[in-house]
Amino acid sequence: MSGDRLLRAAARHSGAHLVALGALAILSAAGHLLLPAALGHTLDQLLTARPDATRWVLLCVALLAALAVCDAGEEILTGTVHARGAAWLRASLIRHVLAVGPRATSRFAPGDLVARMVGNAAHAGIGPATAALLLAALAAPLGAVVALGLIDLWLAVVFLAGAPVLALLLRAFTRASSDCLTRYQQVQGDLAARLAEAVGGARTIAAAGTADRERDRILRPLPELARQGHRMWQVQGRAAAQTGGVAPLLQLGVVATAGLQLAHGRLTVGELFAASRYAVLAAGVGVLVGYLSGLVRARTAGHRLAEVLAEPATEYGDRELPPGTGALTFRGVSVQRAGRTVLSGVDLRVPGGATYAVAGASGSGKSLLAALAGRLADPDEGEVLLDGVPLRDLTHAQVRAAVAYAFERPALLGDTLAGTIALGADLPRDAVVRAARSAHADDFVRRLPRGYDTPCADAPLSGGEVQRLGLARAFAHDGRLLVLDDALSSLDTVTERDIAEALLGPTTGRTRLIVAHRATTAARADQVVWLADGRVCAVGPHEELWQLPAYRKVFGHPAGESGRGPGQEEDLRA
Ligand SMILES: Nc1ncnc2c1ncn2[C@@H]1O[C@H](COP(=O)(O)OP(=O)(O)OP(=O)(O)O)[C@@H](O)[C@H]1O
């Protein structure tokens, strides 16, 4: 969807409010057009001491009062349409980003996404009302030219002779301001992205003592922002000066012609007065420049929102899973990232109910394999099947019900700790507590004054405790496939062993795929998938693979010596 189509959709969403605003703005423009004629006529009535002059004065007062009411109504409706537009755009964007899934943050930096959702959505939100006001504002100059023609044809001819210059100036202004606004908003997004990164890495920056360097890095785009800001002021200033020079000349031409016509007795004093007011209205480009500037800002912001919406949402099929225990199959799976093949030709079959560990050096593709198993990512080539059904063919609800995940650094979403464990399912409290016990989280949760009802934001938790809540969430959700992506890494050895024993013991009807950094975890799995450089090197029991020096090296064990596996050593230490 283009930026303009997005703004049109936002306009449709504002519906009745926008129509009311447009109607009021047209009414106000008509009132402003009537006013000079009414004032001119009243003046003639007063100068010739006609008996109904008082009635005309009262009519003018009523017209001015009506215009004041219109202006107030316009202000209220403009604010309402702006707010509704921005709210609708933000809601659409958030829905879409969540529908795209993890891919969204690899295409756009989180800070940049926030800048688009907050700042750009607010600017784009003013688009519909500004377009309506601009159209209504155009009615005033056009109507004023017609009124000049009705008073005297020469007045309109004189004005129209100079009008193309004004039109050209407005066009040049629109182009130049659109260019610098686009750049300005890009730089703002860049700044926001840098700031969000620094906030996320505040601990690392403090530990490294690099606050000054980080501040310089965040603010590096600032001179460019200032340059674009100055350029924008220059463009606006130049437009104001140029139109401010041309408009009075046009007004002067009209008034001089009207004066000549008055001298020849073809116009009354009231008509000359009305003509001078219409000349001001017809050359009133100052208002147009203001609306044009707002519309250009809204369109450039709309374009930035449309870029996010252009990222295709994850598509789901309509198939359901047959009965099964979670047999997982990778067929010729390859994945590219940043132009590089990071998983290549992976063929793998994990039988239903089996526990497979995934081991490999850092960057070998373990997390990517785990993400593919539950459709958190899609392969560029090949396919992944669960119980014989390609994951792409399954409904969204089926995939999420069938696959539970736990991560190294789980996000504590949900209002309370109980809510974060039950996230995505309507679970009774006893199911939440059972899951927390399996993940060794029940003890520390109960020690908190409000226990399971502690708001997530108020819970002082260590990295290992957060990880246990993430595990509890995965345990609480039934499903035929459980994927743990490095989800035991922050646990102490004893807890890790206890959880792994419970987790990796014999189960009924649930397949487990576990990214393992510790040999103890790999040793407990039925089979280990050994990855190196995005390829499957071997699949086999840990004890067999342990005979291979390169495999031992994955776990930091000297490649030359097979001896007792570090899995066993850690068990003994524990
Ligand atoms: N969005 C991305 N853009 C570019 N490269 C990526 C992206 N995601 C992953 N990669 C690359 O893909 C490769 C595999 O990444 P992955 O996270 O699966 O590794 P890993 O084996 O889990 O590593 P670790 O043990 O360190 O967590 C890495 O080289 C990584 O740099």
Image (tube, helix red, strand yellow):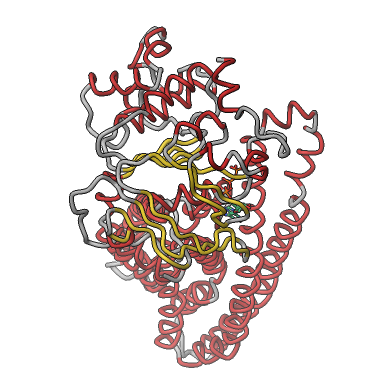
x and y percent of residue 97 in the render?
43, 53
Q: Is residue 560 above or below residue 209?
A: below
For the image, the number of numbered tags is: 0
x and y percent of residue 506 in the render?
32, 30
Q: Is residue 82 above or below residue 433?
A: below
Q: Quadrant of the C terminus?
A: top right
Q: Please, which residue is most extreme toward the left here?
A: 323
User: Could you tell whether 113 is left or right of 175 in the image?
Assistant: left
Give the camera-side residue of 427 and 566.
566
Residue 20 showing in the rendered view: no
Q: Quadrant of residue 535?
A: bottom right
x and y percent of residue 371 in the render?
45, 49
Give the camera-side residue of 511 and 342.
511
x and y percent of residue 518 in the render?
57, 31
Residue 214 showing in the rendered view: yes
Q: Residue at x 27, y 61 (%)?
A: 15
Q: Residue at x 58, y 21 (%)?
A: 570
Q: Quadrant of residue 361?
A: top right
Q: Quadrant of the N terminus?
A: bottom left
User: Could you tell whether 422 is left or right of 148 in the image?
Assistant: left
Give the camera-side residue of 424 and 550.
550
Q: Is residue 392 above or below residue 210?
A: below
